[in-house]
Amino acid sequence: MMGPPGAGKGTQGEALARLWSIPRIAPGDIFRAAIKNGTELGKQVKAYNDAGKLVPDDLVIEVITKRLQEPDAQGGWILDGFPRTVPQAIALNEFLHSIHQKYDLVINLEVPEEILLQRLQKRAQEQGRADDTIEVIRQRLQEYHEKTKPLLEFYAEGVAPVDGTPSMEVVTQNIQALVKGVCPCLNKTQ
């Protein structure tokens, strides 16, 4: 599941994971839980966060590949927030090949920047994140576009664009219709 901040990746990922009874796997969720629980991974991630640095690719890849091997992920999964870079995508492809799995589709939620700005400002206000100014939000969107364009090119014909501007329910239905022909294994729960 790809798309800029505010496109609805997490919301759609959670809704689809429930519908299809498969896990939504998001590094951010894993890292937040590890920090909250004070695990060794949480301490490492917190140190990067405190230093204002991104968690290195090798650590993110290690965490995701371990998660993809857990029993609940054997019947399918939705990745949200991973991969974020081409090296992560290459590592994911190599890992999936090594365990004889594949991804079926790369869904890219597309939302015009003005709508993203409105959504992100609203989310920042609701969550009390005063540091999420319009300038910070624009910077996050710019960084996303710089890093994501190469990813979209990497996946090329495997990318399925989905309009993320309608209501949550309509976007979910559109994704279900798109996936229906690609992965018949998920149709049993629809």
Image (cartoon, rainbow, N blue to C red):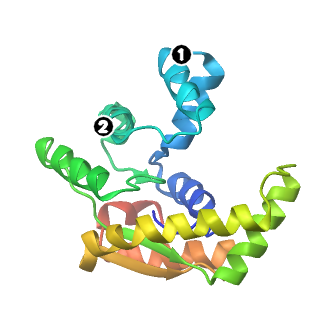
Q: Secondary structure at mark 1?
A: loop
Where residue 63 appears, as percent x and y from the top left, is 38, 33
Dot 2 crowding, Cα within 10 Å, few <14, some 14–19, many 20+: some
Where residue 33 appears, as percent x and y from the top left, is 60, 29
Where residue 1 appears, as percent x and y from the top left, is 45, 62
The reply to whether residue 167 is in sight is no
**Corner quadrant of residue 51:** top right
Reading the image, the residue beneath label 2 is 65
Q: Residue at x 60, y 15 (%)?
A: 38
Check disc 1 and give the amino acid type: Thr
The reply to whether residue 57 is in sight is yes
Report the side of 29 relative to 95 (left or right). right
**Corner quadrant of residue 115:** bottom right
Of residues 82 and 181, the one nearer the viewer is 82
Of residues 159 and 114, the one nearer the viewer is 114
Q: Residue at x 13, y 47 (%)?
A: 100
Report the side of 159 relative to 102 (left or right). right
Q: CA distance from mark 1 to mark 2?
A: 18 Å
N-term mark: 1 or 2: 1
Can you tell which of label 1 and label 2 is closer to the viewer?
Answer: 1
Q: Which mark is residue 39?
A: 1
Above or below, 85 against 75 in this view is below
Check disc 2 and give the amino acid type: Thr
Where residue 148 appears, as percent x and y from the top left, is 42, 68
Q: Secondary structure at mark 2?
A: helix
Of residues 66 and 51, the one nearer the viewer is 51
Above or below, 180 against 54 in this view is below
